[in-house]
Amino acid sequence: MQDDNNTKSVDCKEPETIRKELDDKFKPKKEQGLLLSDSYRRLELDKRAVKVMECGTFLEWRLYENGDQRLNHANFCKDRLCPMCSWRRSLKVFGQLSKVMEVLRELYQFVFLTLSMKNCTAEELSQAISALLGAWDRFSRTVPFKNAFEGFFRALEVTRDTDPIITPLMWYGSKKSHRKPKAAYYQNQGLSIGDPNPTFDTYNAHLHVITAVLPSYFKKGDYISQQQMIQLWRRACKVDYDPTAHIQKITQKGLKDVSEIDMSAAIAEVAKYSVKSRDFIVKDRFGNVVEDITDSGVLAFLRGLTGRRLYSYGGCFKKAAAELGITDKLDDDLVNTETGEVLAPELSYMILQYSWMMGCYNLVSKERHMNIDIVPD
Ligand SMILES: [Zn+2]
């Protein structure tokens, strides 16, 4: 096997699609991961710092005669906050959930729920997540929930407000970045654009849920209105205010006339990262990391999310997932994120190995072979 660190010595060109994926997808996550590793080091979490620093430094692709190119081996770290691993988890959830819903849509329609409670401070975050998940447990066991919904997929997401002042984007919102306009909220408090942001450095834990309903749901008595949903969620949360409980119907005009865009938008929303690295790696306008705000965020997210079940299936979703051989143990395999047929690595005709060196991915080995397993351990 060729083992030469000089890319130029490799005889023929690497596939452009793999180079593009490395530069556009893997590299930015790797760079964010290194900033997370720096933060872990400052927090004296040295083991984590090393693990995240080494995440995704080795990637191996296999090429197949039918044109398939599959990532076959990688050293992912599985750290909860690692941007690389969060991306892999998200890809995996997206693929799995798409499969499950493809099966379920023969029988069901879908409703999208966003459930949340008030924002909290870094110190309160872990407790707030426990309260949210506890409320979900109570809510999903209630009679109205069971009568209305045949099953669900739920995902936990935590966001942090990192804007010190109210920006036009926050005021007017943006469809592109899924931000709702908050002008009315600020106006109620006598605030305008440029004023200090009243929710700066607070956290919001929320659940995105896709539930399955029978087609008759929208006409019969078990239908839960927006107002009823808020009251049911409020009772489950045991709070003295109206918490966020937003319902959206996932657009389907008929079983054969499904709006693919809306369906995949809903799947993308639940499959997105539990925490985005821009919420803890905070930079100033010159692009430099603001260390104290970054480190306090890293610590809060780490404490809040460690040991939590980020995603879970219930009812008909759980049954369909089990029949497809899908579990919610995502971290068992972050290499293969596709749910289709898994091609046997020995059937590939080419192995490409990449290493992260000097700030980019370099092709370090390219080996043509025929049905011989020569993967190093
Ligand atoms: Zn990782």
Image: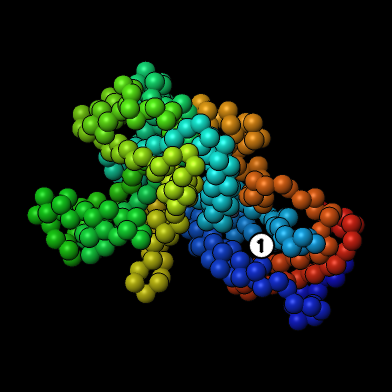
Residue at 64% across, 49% down: 338
In percent of width and height, residue 184 lies at 15, 52
Residue 356, relative to residue 9: is it above or below? above
Position of 336 with respect to 155 (left or right) is right
Query: In the rendered view, how is the structure colored?
Result: rainbow
* Camera sees residue 243: yes
> Circle 1 sits on which residue?
57
In percent of width and height, residue 115 lies at 34, 37
The extreme bottom residue here reads 8
Q: Toward the viewer: 107 or 313?
A: 107
Residue 204 falls in image quadrant = top left
Q: Toward the viewer: 292 or 122?
A: 122
In percent of width and height, residue 134 lies at 39, 27
| Label 1 Cα crowd, 10 Å radius (few <14 / some 14-19 / many 20+) | some
Position of 51 with respect to 63 (left or right) is left
Rendered-image quadrant of the N terminus = bottom right
The extreme top residue here reads 143
Residue 27, relative to residue 217: is it above or below? below
Residue at 40% across, 52% down: 297
Residue 243 falls in image quadrant = top left
Q: Toward the viewer: 168 or 95?
A: 95
Position of 130 with respect to 349 (left or right) is left
Q: Amino acid at mark 1?
A: Thr
Residue 241 falls in image quadrant = top left
In percent of width and height, residue 116 lies at 32, 38
The number of discs equals 1
Position of 209 with respect to 232 (left or right) is right
- Helix, strand or loop for disc 1: loop
Residue at 55% across, 30% down: 318
Residue 81, relative to residue 233: is it above or below? below
* Camera sees residue 89: no
